[in-house]
Amino acid sequence: MDVQVDRDLIRSEREKRAWSQEHLAGAAGIGARTLQRIEATGVASYVSVRALSAALEIPVDELRAGAASPAAEQIPPARLRFALRWVGTAVMLAMLAGVGGFLLLHDYQKVRVLRTFEHWVTTEPSLGAANRSDGR
């Protein structure tokens, strides 16, 4: 039974180790011509795939064509930077809106908000235990 394999992955793993096709074929126990055919067509017998898997120390599932490699699942750096920039901008705008809203309050309302927050922090056991002034 023939299996479709990721020929680019096999070639890149072989080149990463600086192995020739003959060396990998010998390490896997298959013929050099068989390895050349696998790298050219991406078709191999299951026995050859298992032998290559053992020689390259890569799971058989990753050698199969269409298997998602870990590198393919990662978010590209440019897209990640773009997303982080937008998240940072959103957080900054939310903080500015909160500060701006606080500054728009009248003085007596500000004092009331601050006292409520202080009371909440000092009475909530999980939040303000280290900040209590009474030493509890």
Image (spheres, rainbow, N blue to C red):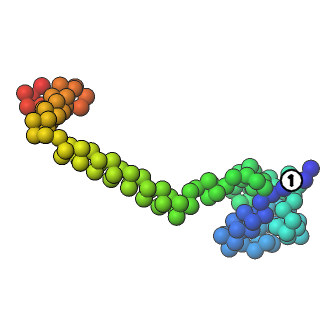
Task: Please give the name of the residue rendered at 73% of the width and 52% of the height, measured from the top-left corner.
Answer: 67
Residue position marked by numbered label 1 in the rendering:
3
- In the foreground, 42 or 95: 95
Pick the residue in front: 86 or 73.
Answer: 86
Q: Where's residue 72, x and y in %? A: 64, 57
Q: Going 92% across and 50% down the picture, which residue do you hit? A: 1
**Picture coordinates of residue 71 (x, y %)?**
62, 58
- Split into 4 quadrants, where in the image is the C terminus? top left
Mark 1 secondary-structure assignment: strand
Q: Is residue 3 left or right of residue 130?
A: right
| Amino acid type shown at disc 1 | Val
Where does residue 134 sit, x and y in percent of width and height?
7, 27
Q: Camera-side residue: 72 or 32?
A: 72
Where does residue 69 sit, x and y in percent of width and height?
A: 67, 55
- Report whether residue 130 is seen: no
* Residue beneath the point at 10% across and 40% down: 107
Q: Pick whichever, 74 or 49, lies toward us.
A: 74
Image check: 74 left or right of 125?
A: right
Report the residue that reaches farthest toward the right. Answer: 1
Q: Determine crowd level at label 1: few under 14, some 14-19, many 20+ residues with C-alpha closer than 10 A.
A: some
Q: Picture quarter containing residue 19?
A: bottom right
**Residue lying at the far left of the rendered structure:** 134
